[in-house]
Image (cartoon, helix red, strand yellow):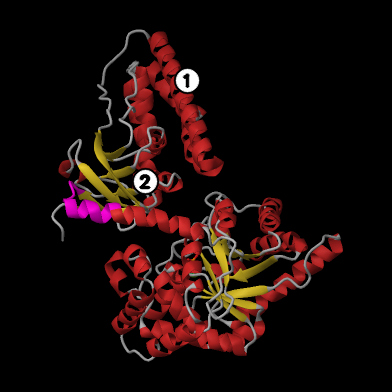
Amino acid sequence: MRKNLLKGVAAAAGISIGIAYLYEKQIEVVENEFITDVDEALKSFDTALKKSQKELKKIFKLAVDKMGEKRAGIFEAQMMILEDPVLIDIIKNRIKSEKRTPAFVVDEEISKYQEVLALSKATYMQERKHDIEDIKNRIIRNLKKKKWKSRIDKDVIVVSNNITPADTVLFSRENVKGYVTNFGGLTSHAAIVARSLHIPAVLGIHDATAKIKNGDILVVDGLHGEVIVSPTDEQLKYYQDKHNRLKEYDTELAKLVDKPAETLDGRKIILRANLDIVEELEYIIKNGAEGTGLVRTEQIFNLEDEFPDEEQQYKTYIDLAEKLYPHIVIIRVFDIGGDKVFPVDVKEPNPFLGWRGIRFLLDNEPLFKTQVRALLRASAHKNIKFMLPMVSSLHEVRRAKEIVECCKEELRIEGKDFDNNINIGIMIEVPSVAVMAEEFAEEVDFISIGTNDLIQYLLAVDRGNEIVSSLYKEFHPAVIRTLNKIIKLSKLGKARASMCGEMAGDILATPLLLGMGLDSMSVSAAAIPHIKKIIRSINYEEAKNLAEECLKFKTEREVRERLLEFFKQNFSDELENFV
Ligand code: PEP
Ligand code: MG
């Protein structure tokens, strides 16, 4: 490993080269002191609270401008804590009864919030702890009437122990070129903000602030999660060239937006996008997707508290259908369970083998019916299709179809419009369905291969477990042979096969998938131009030969090496920059 290389979490892609600015957050120290004038203390608490609310409102406004309403919601959540009447009452009562300084009480009370979050097993909740730290410090600083030092030099790469979402937004005004931190993960709000603002970020390096000095030249490679400290001339040149190439490549890709995803010998591929948050829609349209191939409904709604009602769901689905018209919008019904949100309190020893997806929906019929009714009503323009997750037996498909018919009948009686021929598909994520793909294809209108789960179930490797992550292999011969079978069997069963798992967005896999006969894919909005470029640069006939060769290999290594060789011959730029 190169000596001046630091490895961390690849939190926001892109390369940037710049000067390190070590940012140290001032942490206010609070002493356990007593007061004599209660009224004065309450007044100063009110003033500090108002000032903090005002500051946060300003940050929220800036965030809305820079990254849209939904993502700026992080700050709205912080404002809600500042306005929480229960919390404010508790603090005021303690100031009155205990006669302690407001700073001390604020510190103790808000720390309690943080402790609850810290106990949570979910990484996401644990990371919210840092957001709350920001609020606590903000009020205490305002109680001490101190100015916030969030000024930094312009055009620098910020290196810090941790970084709050508020800092991330505020610093972006100074044209920050990158973020490097000791702590923080992929799902931290700072990472989400950095990605939305397109600022390369490598987080969670642990000793970044010990190894980097103010003024050091840094290279941040946000795609690979690497930071080079004081690069050699050779390294600097390498990354400068790479940076320039990526820029040129982006300009090239932008020219493909209106071009079809078609191979050199004229095979047309449907290229759609996966949608996890509604705000992605704009990006999906901008990148030229032919609609969506997977809308994760369990993600677009906040299911932590309750399920959205029919009206709320209808509004969201019809909006997608109208904005993407005449393109097709494939929506997946709630895939709850496994590692996903679970608003119902259930503890399972093996959640991935438990009450997931369609199993949960069939056991909660009113909930399923609400979603189906909303989807049917939104299908009036005839561009909505929907699909069922985690199917493992034909019985589930048949039962789901009966429920859909029942919903149609209800809507007919109510005189509500819908697409009577709405297409229903299934995800193939479970090996039992892969084996019987022909019979399933006969039963439904389309199928979509969910490689994220299919690989984990086929290879018995938990997709989220770091310890076994090296065994999770998309080019394992058993995986690619299974995919090949699914594609062929679906054709026999007369249903079109598509793929919406992450494998569809991996450019290294594209020639192989095309060669196996896949003619429809759904990938992240960002991957669309990349995949389109590969599709438009290969011959279907050549891809078929490549697939035939790969399907004979007995080890993952042979498959991967053959694909790398293919890339070396045909896509050396992509190989160097994106694989
Ligand atoms: C999949 O399993 O490949 C898939 C697309 O579903 P999710 O990642 O939402 O489980
Ligand atoms: Mg899945």
Q: Quadrant of the N terminus?
A: bottom left
* Foreground of the two, 32 or 526: 526
Within 10 Å of disc 1 (Cα), the crowding (few <14, some 14-19, many 20+) is some
Say above or below: 79 vs 521: above
Which x, y percent locates residue 178?
A: 33, 43
Say above or below: 317 vs 145: below
Which x, y percent locates residue 531?
A: 48, 68
Q: Amino acid at mark 1?
A: Lys
Q: Is residue 113 visible?
A: no
* Foreground of the two, 534 or 214: 534
Our reading of the magenta stretch's main secondary structure is helix
Question: Is residue 478 shown left or right of residue 445?
Answer: left
What is the CA distance from the residue labelled 2 to the residue labelled 1?
Answer: 26 Å
- As drawn, the label of residue 127 is 2
- Decide whether residue 233 is among the magenta residues: yes
Q: Which residues are magenta?
A: 229-240
Dot 2: what SS? helix
Say above or below: 290 vs 229: below
- As drawn, the label of residue 50 is 1
Which x, y percent locates residue 468?
A: 29, 70
